[in-house]
Amino acid sequence: MTVIAETDSGTRRLATILFADVAGYSRMMRADEEQTLVDLRAHLAELVAPVVARFHGRIVKTVGDGVMVEFGSAVEAMRSAVELQRGMVERNADLPANRRQTFRIGLHLGDVIIADEDVFGDTVNVAARLQGLAEPGSIVLSRSVHDQVRDKLSLPFRDLGSRGLKNLDRPLQVYAVDGDAAVRPGRRRWLLAGLAAAVLLIVVGAALLLVPRFHLATSRTETARDSTESGLSVAVLLFTNQSGDPTQDYFADGLTEDITRALGRFRPLTVLAYGAVLPYRNKQLAPMELGKALNARFLVAGSVRRMGERVRVTVQLTDAASGTQLWAEHYDDQLTDIFEVQERIARRVAGTLATNLQQIALARSLRKPTASLDAYDLVLRARAEGNESTRAGNRMARELLERVIKLAPTYADAQAELAEATFQRAVYGWSEFAQQDVEAAIRLAQKALEIDEENVLAHSVLARAYTVQQKYDLGLAESERALQINPSDSEVLATRAAVLLWTGQIDESIAAGELAGRLNGNLGPEPALNLGLAYMLKRRYADAVVLLEAARTRYPAYSTLDFPLAGAYAELGRADDAKAALEQGQRKDPYLDLAGFGTRFQDPALKRRIGESLRKAGLK
């Protein structure tokens, strides 16, 4: 019997929520967006819709490449999940490898609120985060679902142990049905000829809400409190893409990021990082609620519409404290003038927020962009590739940036972005000639600074590259210079944290790293690794575990996270977890040993202290 209760906000009832998405969807879209969309629509119409209907579920909405479904029964939800995985295997059998789409599925049972045909509540959030834990082709379920289905369905459930999930007060017991176990050959394909199911494609960025964020193990620092409560804190919300083409989302996102960084160069302003606003994409919150959630006094929102050779940018500035819209304006321009659009928006917002900055030349707060939209387009695509923190994404980013430099050799940002990608190839273990790549990154960063001496990314690359070369004084100087140029840039703060870590200034490194993570939850695996090591050096092993577990979930291919996590587990006496983490790390990087870990430390004693923890975990 289903218990239903009426509330002021909607109908409350018990339900099992299923979240599914396609693994590697972004990569497939880049390779062949039209075919990928055709295939996805076919899977949703010919497999997902009939399977959900068969097991008495309700498709609540699609989320980019995924789908959210409500079931009244945990058993029916589990059966549906298994059928979906089996059906995808059958549908993929006759397709070439580059077109095979694979679902990741998460299931959670709990109380939900139904309002306007939508579903809300913690149960929805937990199901989404469980989906993020699933491997391609597998199903991850909570204990609440497992307790309902374990004696009713003959499935090989694998206990994943207790997992900490974002915004959950206590760890959650989690189980999985792996891909091979979920799939049974010989099943008929779910193909209903003539079914014309309507598939809603919602903004791709909503999927980012399902990704575990960069965790902070402590409350914000005094520095963070002072900066955000200064009265000049601003959040640039993600501009919406109104072009009618979801493949153009990157353009609106890139413009948002550029405006954010440009405004951040005004030192009296505290500008929340691009990554900090990602969880609020498409959330319908009142300005006062949103301002409180982001700890921002002013909110900038806008939209971008590309129409042939023209672009329209609409922007509004709102006082979050009162909900009052201070101004609104739209700009119509030729696409070749996109940088002038960016400059006008940045100037107007900054002038409204900080009139005392009117005498400062805006050119010092803006990068020196090329006039070529083609080059700008390619840089945005390269950023998206590089942010994936994968070998393939890094290679694609470098190829795109090399094309940009041919188009616009004086584009400082392109030189700096290529320096960053080249440096990442060296330090992430993707290069056979790491030392040469570090030297190449230095040359590229220096070239960027010849064009624009205040390019913060170039200074940041130099700071980290010099530290890798054990030129610690140069690394510290470059990180200080970047911080002087833009103290609100989360990547600058993360760079500063890295240099301070390797030079042995651990408390200062933690302060900078925590502030960087607070401003931007999507900084990448290396800042998480650095902060985790700093926690370990201060014997804050529980904090290190919280941070590194979340980062490893977000960046599963980055092997270096597994090793300090194993060491932190070992220090806490969690021998089984330490062994499992070490085994995962060694599968990803079988050549890493104690001698090779922590070689950047200026003080050998710090390397030995980390080594002791890794030795306890079993690393030799």
Image (spheres, rainbow, N blue to C red):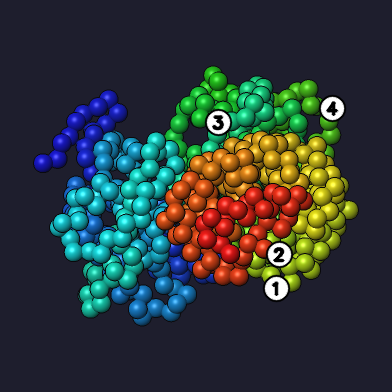
Secondary structure category for the residue under label 1? loop
The three-letter amino acid code for the residue at tag 1 is: Glu
Residue 432: assigned label = 1
The three-letter amino acid code for the residue at tag 2 is: Ala
- The residue beneath circle 3 is 219
Any part of residue 212 in sight? no
Secondary structure category for the residue under label 3? loop
- Comes first in the chain, label 4 or label 2: 4
Residue 231: assigned label = none
- The residue beneath circle 2 is 426
| Residues marked 4 and 1 touching at CB (< 8 Å) | no
For image coordinates 34% across by 38% down, the residue present is 122
The three-letter amino acid code for the residue at tag 3 is: Ser
Secondary structure category for the residue under label 4? loop
Q: Nearer the viewer, residue 471 or 357?
A: 471
- Distance, label 4 to label 1, CA atoms, is 50 Å
Q: Residues within 10 Å of mark 3 (few under 14, many from 20)?
A: few
The three-letter amino acid code for the residue at tag 4 is: Gln
Q: Nearer the viewer, residue 538 or 525?
A: 538
- The residue beneath circle 4 is 359
Quadrant assignment, res 316: top right
Secondary structure category for the residue under label 2? helix
- Comes first in the chain, label 4 or label 1: 4
Q: Quadrant of the C terminus?
A: bottom right
Residue 203 percent location from the top left of the image: 47, 50
- Comes first in the chain, label 3 or label 2: 3
* Image: 379 above or below 186: above
* Image: 212 above or below 377: above
Q: Nearer the viewer, residue 597 or 433?
A: 597
